[in-house]
Image (spheres, rainbow, N blue to C red):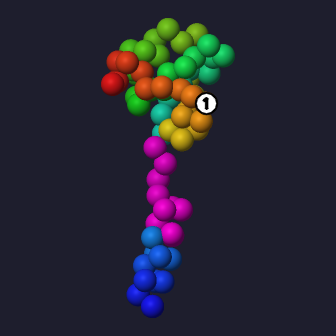
Amino acid sequence: MKTLFLFFALSAYVQTAPKTMVYICDSPSANKYHLKNDCHGLRKCTHHIIKITLEEAKKRKFELCKFED
């Protein structure tokens, strides 16, 4: 019984856990994500800077900016 309760409690937590948000340049040639919207690596962005989940950035095959590594 305790195991079943623990399973449901953990399932609820995982579904409501906050998602990590990152920033990307909304350009077809962009391939890096940034942890802060004022990262040095975003200075050259001539398109919009958008906020997306880290999960989505990785799905798009974006990599962490070298200035934030």
Q: Does the image show residue 14?
A: yes
Q: Main secondary structure of the magenta part?
A: helix
Q: Is residue 47 visible?
A: no
Q: Is residue 13 above or below residue 64?
A: below
The quarter of the picture where the C terminus appears is: top left
x then y, percent, for residue 54: 50, 38
Could you tell whether 7 is left or right of 40 in the image? Answer: right
Q: Quadrant of residue 34?
A: top left
**Residue drawn where x is 53% and y is 62% of the image:** 15
Q: Which residue occupies the extreme right position in the image?
A: 28
Q: Quadrant of the N terminus?
A: bottom left
Position in image of residue 43 (x %, y %)? 46, 11
Q: Residues within 10 Å of mark 1 (few under 14, many from 20)?
A: few
Up the image or down, 43 lies above or below 26; here it is above
Secondary structure type for disc 1:
loop
Seen at 34% across and 24% down, the residue is 68
Residue 56 horizontal/vertical position (percent):
58, 38
Q: Which residues are magenta?
A: 11-20
Q: Position of residue 9 (x, y in %)?
A: 46, 75
Q: Magenta stretch: residue 40 in it?
A: no
User: Is residue 13 located in the magenta-colored stretch of the structure?
Assistant: yes
* Count of numbered tags: 1
Give the labeled residue for mark 1. Answer: 60
Task: Name the one closer to the observer, 62 or 39.
Answer: 62
Q: Residue at x 38, y 15 (%)?
A: 40
Looking at the picture, which amino acid does disc 1 mark? Arg
